[in-house]
């Protein structure tokens, strides 16, 4: 068996693994990365990029139709075939030549195949041709294999060949009828996308829509989807699923009612891609989420480091935050701390230190690209109270800002900030409304920087922009 040694071996060449390897190489170490599918991972080909491509054209059309003058210039309907062609271009037609070229330019060695830990600091790669290769790490092995869609234990569901997020992101045709099981981000975004592309969409949301967000978020998205013709069925739960010979899917609900569709998308959660990476060789359970310490080293159930701390996990697999941008943030911390430990540099593991991912717990930003968009960072009011904070919640009608009036006729939206009254800093911020995604980073900076409200008074928003909501929220707080 061929054997090669590197300073660091990364299993998984998605955005997280790529960023770990890049930081390691920039720090002067050598790195190999192992990938069994496409370099670029889930986000590039089956999640973030293709799904937002499916949504962008209709959001642009919606924006045009909300403005007199532009509205009259729009003479046709959305061209679904053109949207799918653009999506195909965005994902490079599911080829990773560009990503591989970047790895080469960055000095990162790629091994294609399934990577499995075989012993301490050793990864065996079964290549696409079946040939084995042994890789040994001088300093660290990083698991960055991401997650896959979770399929619930519903009678007949597996045999009915359901869509997951992958099939929804990569579909070559728009189904006439699409049923969606779930009420989270994937469910609501794909309901928005496929309704806009012409599907008759039914959402079966047992617990409601976007329930982890502030309550007004789910209410507004539910209303908007229904106005777009989507049948949103709250408290609806699938009991069994079957598919006829003609392809029709039948979903029987727990109350006995039946919903028929041409495709069914299951979007109820994620499961870690750790089933086949050799965890059993080091005393861990295959298929389990990985637990990590503050510097993202893997620990066992008792909290003890694996070996002398050579194993790290970044991204979805550690279950801290299942978002690409947060995984890349972890990757930067992991890459830098591996270099620090390898070169004898001091490790900065204080809160907000260079070698930790403090924002995972305090300041996670997220955008849901529904219509209206949802943008949030930090804690909801309920989460802040549960954390024992004495808070004040300040709400403001986003439509009352002058910039919103100019942005679109009939603009509707809402803004909320959650203030820690002890420290007089913002710990949570949520926006819902058309095109609010680009407003989010200001709130992220305010929360991460723990900017006192008294100082925020001096951050003057330009007029007339929607960002003037910051001033209105501070005024409301001051009253």
Image: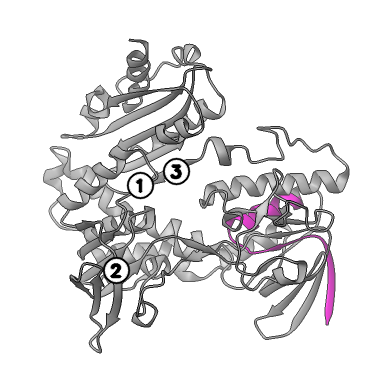
Residue 417 location (% of width, % of height): 39, 26
Residue 316 location (% of width, % of height): 56, 56
Q: Secondary structure at mark 1?
A: loop
Left or right: residue 75 versus residue 232 is: left
Q: Is 183 situated above or below 384?
A: below
Q: Report the magenta residues as a range.
A: 1-25
Label 2 crowd bin: few (<14), some (14–19), many (20+), radius 10 Å: many
Give the residue displayed 60% in from the left and 45% down from the top.
329
Which residue is identified by label 3?
Answer: 366
Q: Earlier in the sequence, mark 1 or mark 2?
A: 1
Left or right: residue 149 versus residue 266 is: right
Label 1 crowd bin: few (<14), some (14–19), many (20+), radius 10 Å: some
Q: Is residue 93 magenta?
A: no
Mark 3 and mark 2 in contact (Cβ < 8 Å)? no
Residue 197 visible in the displayed image:
no
Which residue is identified by label 2?
Answer: 238
């Amino acid at each position: 068996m061929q054997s090669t040694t590197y300073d660091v071996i990364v299993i998984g060449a998605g955005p997280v693994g790529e960023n770990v390897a890049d930081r390691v190489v920039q720090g002067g170490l050598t790195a190999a990365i192992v990938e069994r599918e496409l370099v670029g991972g889930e986000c590039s080909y089956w999640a973030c990029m293709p799904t937002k491509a499916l949504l962008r054209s209709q959001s642009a059309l919606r924006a045009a139709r909300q403005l007199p003058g532009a509205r009259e210039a729009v003479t046709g309907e959305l061209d679904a075939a053109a949207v799918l062609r653009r999506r195909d271009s965005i994902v490079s037609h599911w080829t990773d030549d560009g990503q591989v070229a970047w790895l080469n330019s960055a000095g990162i060695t790629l091994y294609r195949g399934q990577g499995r830990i075989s012993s301490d600091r050793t990864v065996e790669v079964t290549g696409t041709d079946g040939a084995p290769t042994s890789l040994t790490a001088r300093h660290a092995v990083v698991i960055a294999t991401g997650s896959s869609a979770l399929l619930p234990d519903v009678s007949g569901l597996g045999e009915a060949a359901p869509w997951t997020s992958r099939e929804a992101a990569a579909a070559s045709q728009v189904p006439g009828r699409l049923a969606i099981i779930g009420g989270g981000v994937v469910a609501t975004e794909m309901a928005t996308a496929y309704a806009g592309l012409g599907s008759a969409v039914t959402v079966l949301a047992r617990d409601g829509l976007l329930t982890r967000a502030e309550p007004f978020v789910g209410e507004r998205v539910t209303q908007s989807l229904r106005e777009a013709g989507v049948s949103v069925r709250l408290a609806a739960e699938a009991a069994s699923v079957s598919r006829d010979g003609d392809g029709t899917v039948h979903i029987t609900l727990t109350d006995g009612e039946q919903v028929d569709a041409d495709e069914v998308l299951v979007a109820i959660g994620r499961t870690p891609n750790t089933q086949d990476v050799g965890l059993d060789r080091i005393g861990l359970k295959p298929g389990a989420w990985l637990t990590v310490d503050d510097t993202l080293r893997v620990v066992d159930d008792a909290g003890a480091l694996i070996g002398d701390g050579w194993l790290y996990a970044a991204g979805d697999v550690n279950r801290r935050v299942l978002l690409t941008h947060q995984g890349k943030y972890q990757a930067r911390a992991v890459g830098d701390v591996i270099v620090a430990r390898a070169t004898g540099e001091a490790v900065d593991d204080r809160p907000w230190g260079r070698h930790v991912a403090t924002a995972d717990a305090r300041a996670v930003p997220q955008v849901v690209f529904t219509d209206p968009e949802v943008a949030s960072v930090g804690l909801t009011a309920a989460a802040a109270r549960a954390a024992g904070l004495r808070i004040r919640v300040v709400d403001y009608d986003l439509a009352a800002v002058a910039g919103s009036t100019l942005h679109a006729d009939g603009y509707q939206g809402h803004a909320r900030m959650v203030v820690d009254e002890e420290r007089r800093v913002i710990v949570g911020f949520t926006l819902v409304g058309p095109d609010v995604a680009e407003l989010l980073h200001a709130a992220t900076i305010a929360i991460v920087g723990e900017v006192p409200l008294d100082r925020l008074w001096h951050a003057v928003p330009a007029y007339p922009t929607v960002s003037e909501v910051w001033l209105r929220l501070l005024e409301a707080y001051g009253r």
